[in-house]
Every structure is written in C-alpha cells, then in structure tokens.
Amino acid sequence: MRPSFDPVTLAVPLFILTIVLEIVLARFGKVKAVYEPKDTAMSLLMGLGSSVAGLLTGGLILAATIWVYQYRLFTIPMNAWWAWVAILFAEDLAYYGFHRFSYERRLWWAAHVNHHSSQHYNLATALRQSWTGGINGAWVMWLPLSLLGFPPAMILIQKGISLVYQFWIHTEAVKRMPAWFEAVFNTPSHHRVHHARNPRYLDRNYGGILIIWDKMFGTFQPELDVEPVRYGIVKNLGGFNLLRVAFHEWVGMGKDLLSAKSVREAAGYVFGAPGWSPDGSRQTSDMIRKQWQDTQTAEPAKTDPAAV
C-alpha cells in the first residue's frame, strides 16, 4: 500500500534549487537570510540521516497503519474530491497533536529538539529533521486516520504534502502574507514564532499547513515587530557535532534516569515536560513564561509592546 506518488521525493530538486536561490539573493542583499556554512551543513546532514532512519523504521509504521486499517469504521475512497478535503483537515489535526505533544513530553521532545537546534532560520533549517522520530511512538497520532477509513497510501501522500508545504515557511525572506492567508494558513511569520526561544514565543504555533488549530486550542501567538525572534533552543548547543545534535537530549534523559531515586522520578524524566526535575531546580517552558509574565506585570512601562 505504499503510494506511487511521493510528494517529498518529487520536491527534493525544488528544495535544493530554492536553498541555493535564497543564498544567492541574500548574498546580493535582495532578501533577508543568514547562512553559516557549518550550520547549513549540519542541517543537510541531519536531513540525509533522517531519510536513512526513515527507511529503517518506515516498514514497521506502515505495517501498523495497514493493520489498523483492517478494522476501519468506514471505507473512504481515494478518488473522491471530498476525501482529500477531509484528510487535509484530519491529517493536519493529527500533526498538530503530534507537534504539541513533542513539546509537552520529553520522550517526544528528544526526537524533535534537533529540528530547533539551529540559531539561524532559513530554508536549509527545514531539512534539519529527526533521526529518532520513528522509535518513540509519536507516529501513533496518525493511526486514528486509518481507523476512520482513510487508506494508508492516502495518509502517506497527505503527510508528504504537509512536509513539502512546511518547507517554504522556514524563511525570513517573506515578512507577511495577505491577512486572509495569515488567518487560516501557517506562514513564515507564524512559524518564525514557533522556532523562537523568546519567553513570549515559547511553545506556540504548532500547526502544519493550517494555523486554525492553534487559534482554537489557545496556542497561537502572532509575531510582533516590537520583539524580534531569537532562534534556537533555551540552552543552545554552541557547536556543530553531528552526533550531539542528533542525540544530546536522549543522552541527557539517560543520565537523568540513572540518577532517578524512584519510579515517579524516572517517569517524570521521561514523560514529564522538557526541563522537569523533581525539585523544580530546572525550568520548563511554562515556568520560563510565567517568570517572564511576572516581569511584564512588574515593569509594564519597559516591556509592554503597547508602550513602545
């Protein structure tokens, strides 16, 4: 049931062409884009490694998808136009759930954090993908689509379309899209917020193609001109070691598990929020945001955008 149409494979030449184009236009001052050779190489190597890892785990994920499809509630035809409209919304909602949990649970964050490890934001950053996304079970978020009756091939195609769409929003070259587009779809502006480490912007804008889920579930944050985005993770790696970028959070989680003094602590280190610690000595995103909000309340004249 593998699809004969693979959007990602077909889009690879476009990925390469547009990255080169962005570099050239930035060099001549035509667009805003910062490329650092080592950082760009890291993104490309992470993308290559992700493709290899996908070959190793893809069979298991496909088998699970096909197995669930046997017990489907409905049979949704691939040749119906309404089915593609339905799966656009259904798959994007599944992606929102996966993406949000990848920030709220350390086990999933360990596989996703490397995508955010660059301190630059350009089209090459989009290729900085996980090597371990297939081993932590995050893919179960898409299994309900098979249970509903969407054919596995249809799900894979739509996942590919979503991934291709998300490539172009990794850029600083586009400031804002038209207001109607910004209201419904994920855009470079919305996704810059998602890649930010500013306390105001932390853990926001999880949507894939659509931004409506963030607005519905209270995780939307617009990009503000008065607060430029600072890219990266809360504690940046400060280097370009490929294995460290790929596995640093897994290593950190392993060390924490070895130091755990109880089952509760062990569970917290794995399934708690990134940054969780038994004594609260580390900071989660919620703690960082609350600390920042307290500062805003104490010093509104200095930090309130309305006062700028």
Image (spheres, helix red, strand yellow):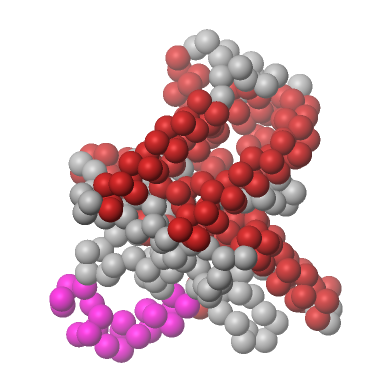
Horizontal arrangement in the rendering, residue 51 relative to residue 161 (left or right): right
> Does residue 15 appear anywhere in the picture?
yes
Which residue appears at 78% of the width and 70% of the height?
254
Q: Position of residue 287 (x, y in %)?
A: 51, 78
Q: Quadrant of residue 295?
A: bottom left
Q: Position of residue 163 (x, y in %)?
A: 50, 38
Is residue 234 positioned above or below 52 on the image? Answer: below
Which residue appears at 55% of the width and 56% of the height?
42
Q: Nearer the viewer, residue 210 or 58?
A: 58
Q: Quadrant of residue 306?
A: bottom left
Q: Nearer the viewer, residue 176 or 241?
A: 241
Which residue appears at 66% of the width and 24% of the height?
152
Q: Quadrant of the C terminus?
A: bottom left
| Residue reaching furthest to the bottom | 298
Horizontal arrangement in the rendering, residue 247 relative to residue 113 (left or right): right
Q: Quadrant of the N terminus?
A: top right
> Does residue 222 appear anywhere in the picture?
no
* Magenta part, dominant SS: helix
Is residue 147 positioned above or below 33 on the image? Answer: above
Horizontal arrangement in the rendering, residue 279 relative to residue 25 (left or right): right
Is 107 colored magenta in this rendering?
no
What residue range appears in magenta?
Answer: 288-308
Q: Position of residue 178 (x, y in %)?
A: 20, 41
Q: Nearer the viewer, residue 249 or 194?
A: 249
Which residue appears at 59% of the width and 56% of the height?
112
Is 291 colored magenta in this rendering?
yes
